[in-house]
Image: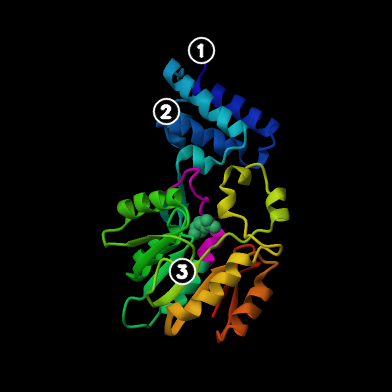
Amino acid sequence: MTTIQAWKVETAALLKEAGLASTADLDARLLLQMATGYDQAKQILLYDRVLTDAQLHKLSSIREDRLRHKPMAYILGCKEFYGRNFLVDERTLIPRPDTETLIEAVIAFSKGKQQPPSIIDLCCGSGCIGITLALELDANVTLSDLSEDALSLARENAKRLLSKPVTFLQGDLLSPTDKIYDIIVSNPPYLTAAWCDEVSNEVRWEPRLALEGFSEDGLGLIRKLVKESGNHLCCGGALFLECDYRQAKDVAELLSSHRFTDVCIERDLSDRDRVVWG
Ligand code: GLN
């Protein structure tokens, strides 16, 4: 017989032993909520309720996943981004709070403009960037990704969150389109192979295709994207890119050397260079 409280205490201890100390208590609570439907208040109120066999079965399977450092977002199947819940699974990268810096920069740029902008989100993954901008700016959005798997998840998110139509393109960066946009935005894969090898056990669950930037300095895709962007931006349009804080200066120089003006670097929540635009 295992009560809610006993399961929570035992699970938090196991997670701490497994090297997940900083989130162990929260994770135990969320796993319990997932399997029983009881929120935090109910879990406290019903602390001595005995869990059913079916609940224990479900709980043991999701606890096993977490003990193997599977990210909570993949276990729960969703992740909050800019105040909205996005479906996520192993088909795509998990949306990061740092990427909200990219959203803020695009919103600030678009303020005061009369028409809703046309925006293409390249390497869209779950679609979190493009869908958020469609909602925040009433923008006409195109979501593009190399991975069919990623696009299928982006489609599900767009269907759940948007009432307006979105264009989906499958292919390498801007190659599947001949259109001109007001804004090109992307959080492309940009890690070097060495950085990829050093990521935490949790990040190892995410698709390497969404992480690694395909050149020694990780900037292979960004270089290609900057080069192609010139042919796809309207006059007065802008390109917004997320990158690693160790790459921001190089990316800013890259933009300047491709005739982008007013190039800016924005800092993320950890006060690190994260977004470059021009
Ligand atoms: N654009 C998606 C995100 O920001 C996916 C990024 C990627 O796959 N590199 O989460």
Mark 2 and 3 residues: CB-CB less than 8 Å, in contact? no
Find numbered disc 1 in the image and state the secondary structure of the residue it sits on. loop
Range drawn in magenta: 87-101
Query: Measuring 49% from the left and 80% from the top, which residue is drawn there?
Result: 230
Q: Is mark 1 within 8 Å of ligand 1?
A: no
Q: Amino acid at mark 1?
A: Met
Residue, disc 2: 36
Residue 54 falls in image quadrant? top left
Mark 2 and 1 residues: CB-CB less than 8 Å, in contact? no
Find numbered disc 2 in the image and state the secondary structure of the residue it sits on. helix
Find numbered disc 3 in the image and state the secondary structure of the residue it sits on. loop
Q: Is residue 275 visible?
A: no
Q: Earlier in the sequence, mark 2 or mark 1?
A: 1
Q: Is residue 209 visible?
A: yes
Residue, disc 1: 1
Up-down: is 260 above or below 122? below
Residue, disc 3: 174
Left or right: residue 61 versus residue 247 is left
Q: Earlier in the sequence, mark 2 or mark 3?
A: 2
The quadrant of the image that shows the C terminus is bottom right
**Which one is nearer the viewer's eye here, 201 or 230?**
230
Distance between the Cα atoms at labels 1 and 3? 58 Å
Residue 35 falls in image quadrant? top left
Query: Measuring 45% from the left and 46% from the top, which residue is drawn there?
Result: 88
Left or right: residue 194 versus residue 183 is right
